[in-house]
Image (tube, grey):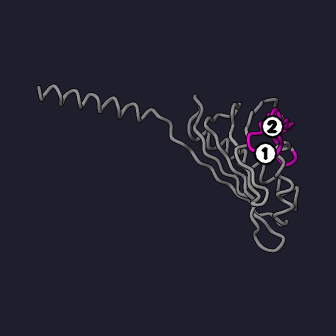
Amino acid sequence: MSKLLVALSLLAFGFTAEANAAEPTSLYVIKSVNINAPAAKVWDKISKFSDLGAWHPAVAKTEITSGVDGKKGAKRTLTLQDGGKINEQLTAYNSKNKMMSYIIVDSVLPVTAYASTLHVYTNGADKSVVVWEGSFLPKAPADEKTASDTIGGVYDGGLNNLKKILE
């Protein structure tokens, strides 16, 4: 009887290890940019959940589909330059701290379980730093590198253009 229990235990452990190995790893990307402009001016540019296209070159149109701009729970649809769509929901917004967080509900991007935060910090007299960070899982059939590279590219594109617009 004890040999049977040992064999079943080993078999169960093998299935558990195999199942755990198949679970995707949560990924994290953080990017930042220093901008020679006051934090208030930078925040004014990026603070409108209803207008990501005002500073991100990949976004052709932003539309609030429910809720109120700048209020937790607001939903937006981004239409990309290539026609792709991304549906997002605002999960936190703090104008005083110059911060907003949001999640992707549905997207053409190769990620799922995506949550992101944008934050503007003062970095000296008339200078600021913008930090954009996100966590996510790769969406099949994308791999971790493709998912991370895509999000990193989105962040770089937006932050570099923001710097160009504001300096």
Span highlighted in magenta in the image = 54-79
Q: Amino acid at mark 1?
A: Lys
Image position of 47 (left or right of 28): right
Q: Identify the secondary structure beneath mark 2.
A: loop
Image quadrant where one finds the N terminus: top left
For residue 67, which numbered disc appears in the image?
2
- Dot 1, how many residues are within 10 Å of its Cα: few (below 14), some (14-19), or many (20+)? some
Residue 5 in the image: state x and y as whole percent: 17, 28
Q: Can you say whether 127 is above or below 103 in the image? A: below
Residue 21 in the image: state x and y as whole percent: 41, 35
For residue 71, which numbered disc appears in the image?
1
Q: Can you say whether 119 is above or below 84 in the image? A: below
Q: Residue at x 56, y 35 (%)?
A: 143
Cα–Cα gap, marks 2 and 1: 7 Å
Q: Does the magenta portion include 73?
A: yes
Q: Residue at x 86, y 54 (%)?
A: 45
Residue 79 in the image: state x and y as whole percent: 82, 33
For residue 35, which numbered disc appears in the image?
none
Q: Residue at x 82, y 29 (%)?
A: 83
Q: Please state the total of marks drawn on the protein image.
A: 2
Residue 46 in the image: state x and y as whole percent: 82, 52
Q: Amino acid at mark 2?
A: Gly
- Dot 2, how many residues are within 10 Å of its Cα: few (below 14), some (14-19), or many (20+)? some
Image marks 2 and 1: residues in contact by CB distance under 8 Å: yes
Q: Can you say whether 115 is above or below 112 in the image? A: below
Instruction: State the residue in front, 108 or 153.
Output: 108
Q: Identify the secondary structure beneath mark 1.
A: loop
- Give the image quarter of residue 6: top left
Q: Residue at x 56, y 39 (%)?
A: 144
Q: Does the magenta portion include 125?
A: no
- Give the image quarter of residue 122: bottom right
